[in-house]
Image (cartoon, grey):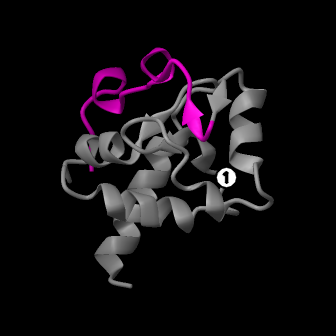
Amino acid sequence: MKPETLGFFEKVYDVARLIPEGRVTSYGAIAKYLGAVRSARIVGYAMNGSFGKDVPAHRVVNRVGLLSGKHHFEGTNLMQQLLENEGIKVKDNQIQNFEKHFWDPTKELEEFEG
């Protein structure tokens, strides 16, 4: 992996750590916040590699609220269970009331410095 990719991953983790409990964001929203609008997939790769780094990866979903990364969690429903423990309802791998729970880092955080 290229060193610049690893640096980007750390920036992704820093943003993900700021997602409040009971809220979710999308891969694309993180990418946009970091100034890499077309890099949602790279944010997904970062989330896949985040385990053991104290990153709440369960709070990052796809752009319509689907738990598209759930197969990267241990067990069959761990991602869903973690979200439900925070008060987020999930039905058929879809976050219910997605707009209500959506946290947009571009609106919630100051402009990214780095």
Q: Residue 2 appears at what percent x and percent y?
A: 33, 83
Q: Residue 64 appears at what percent x and percent y?
A: 39, 36
- The front one of 70 and 56 is 70
Q: Residue at x 42, y 45 (%)?
A: 62
Q: Residue at x 29, y 74 (%)?
A: 4
Q: Residue at x 47, y 23 (%)?
A: 98
Q: Residue 56 appears at what percent x and percent y?
A: 62, 45
- The front one of 28 and 80 is 80
Horizontal arrangement in the rendering, residue 101 relative to residue 4 (left or right):
right
Is 106 colored magenta in this rendering?
yes
Q: Farthest residue toward the front?
A: 92
| Extent of the magenta region | 92-114
Q: Secondary structure at mark 1?
A: loop
Q: Residue 46 appears at what percent x and percent y?
A: 46, 63
Horizontal arrangement in the rendering, residue 63 relative to residue 114 (left or right):
right
Q: Quadrant of residue 53?
A: bottom right
31 up-or-down from 105: above or below: below
Q: Quadrant of residue 41?
A: bottom left
- The front one of 51 and 89 is 89
106 up-or-down from 72: above or below: above
Q: Which residue is mark 1?
A: 54
1 up-or-down from 110: above or below: below
Q: Residue at x 47, y 48 (%)?
A: 14
Is 45 colored magenta in this rendering?
no
Kind of residue indicated by mark 1: Asp
Q: Farthest residue toward the bottom?
A: 1
66 up-or-down from 90: above or below: below
Horizontal arrangement in the rendering, residue 55 relative to residue 6 (left or right):
right
